[in-house]
Amino acid sequence: MKDILWIIRERFIIWKNHPLQVLFLLGVPLLSIVMYLFIYNSSGTGSANSLTVGIVDQDQSSYSQYFIDTFDKRIQVKELKNQEQADKALADQQVTATLFLPKDFSEKIRQGDLAPVRFRSFQAGEAIDSLKETTKTVYHEVQTIAKFAAASDEEIAFDFAAENTPIRFRSFAKDSVSKEMTLQILGFMLMMLLYQSGNFGANSIQNERRNKIYHRLMTTPVSKTAYFIGTAVFAFLAMIFEVVFTVSLMTLAFRIDIGLAAIQLIGMLAAFGLVAVAWSIAIGINSPSQSFASGVQSILFTITSLISGALIPNEIMPDFMQQIARITPQYWVLDGIKQLQNQNNANIWLNLVVLTAFLLLFFSISTYGFMKKKSLEVFD
């Protein structure tokens, strides 16, 4: 135990004497958060812009057009010609929902009767409920104009309505946008954690083997086991520091609503940090050279980050890619975070079991490489 603590202490001294490494460790979380905040703010992501409603106007009257124009002030509208086109747009996810204004829409409105407006969507939840409420609000506005027109004149009524200040409707998507932004920030952070684990784990081992530091350490009472355990523990502590620093920045400094308890998020990211360290150590032990280890790390870490949904939202990928994503540890971390955001705490155990399986796999590969290597000091 004393040897392990000595290795950890020595690695900490070496690390803090390299300002660029310290700056990189602190700068990556800050950079990723600022970058995604800028992207989301500049794109104007919000409830009114994140949804599109397709409207089929079978009436083609001044009242139906007023309905569409008023709806468009609140939610983005896509006008469709017929039901077939509406069904295709809904199936292709070009629109979130569809509305059908019947042929007798204006006639019913003028008579003070209810005109049946059909609402269709494949989704459910707060966003769809808000769309339904918006539909009712717009419908009531059209009824108000009709009553005003009945007492005076339709042209006067529509002219009066056109002079009103447009309403800006922003409400229900705030939480969903915060959660989406949280996942994108954390997805980028997962890839950075992998590369950081490589710097603290595999690259340290390879550098010390190449520079004969490892060989000199083996002439001291420090054992091989203590050397590798100390290296792994130090790398994991670095991951924990970056995780806590990132979550603190998101919740305290930038006030991002992460959608779950901070301790839960730290726990999920810490679990991934442990997997990342084991993965990096496995590559470092089994690689014949530093260049080979760096190349393998770059390929594996980047490709798995892309297909897992860490950099590109998994939902927009084809179905077969969504299934392939399940073979990556990043997918199970992000899925676990989504489960916690949706308060599906009972399902989180599957994610933890899968991450544990990845940890055991990489640990087994490391152990195999450790036992197989007879002369680790021979390098390059």
Image: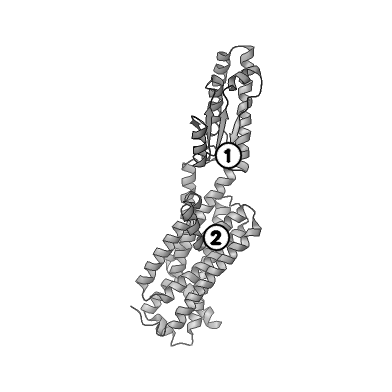
Residue nearer the viewer, 207 or 53: 53
Which dot marks residue 121? 1
Drawn side of residue 200 relative to residue 98, left or right: left
Q: From what the image shows, is residue 96 above or below residue 253?
A: above
* Percent coordinates x, y for residue 272 in the rendering: 53, 64
- What residue occupies the far front of the structure in this picture? 84
Residue picked out by circle 2: 333
* Percent coordinates x, y for residue 7 in the rendering: 49, 78
* Percent coordinates x, y for residue 124 in the rendering: 61, 43
Say which residue appears at 56% left-offset and 65% top-offset. 354
* Percent coordinates x, y for residue 219 in the rendering: 43, 88
In three-dimensional space, the C-alpha distance between marks 2 and 1, rounded to whole angstroms, equals: 30 Å
The N terminus - image quarter: bottom right
Mark 2 or mark 1: name the one nearer the start of the chain.
1
Which dot marks residue 171? none
Say which residue appears at 58% left-offset and 25% top-offset. 102
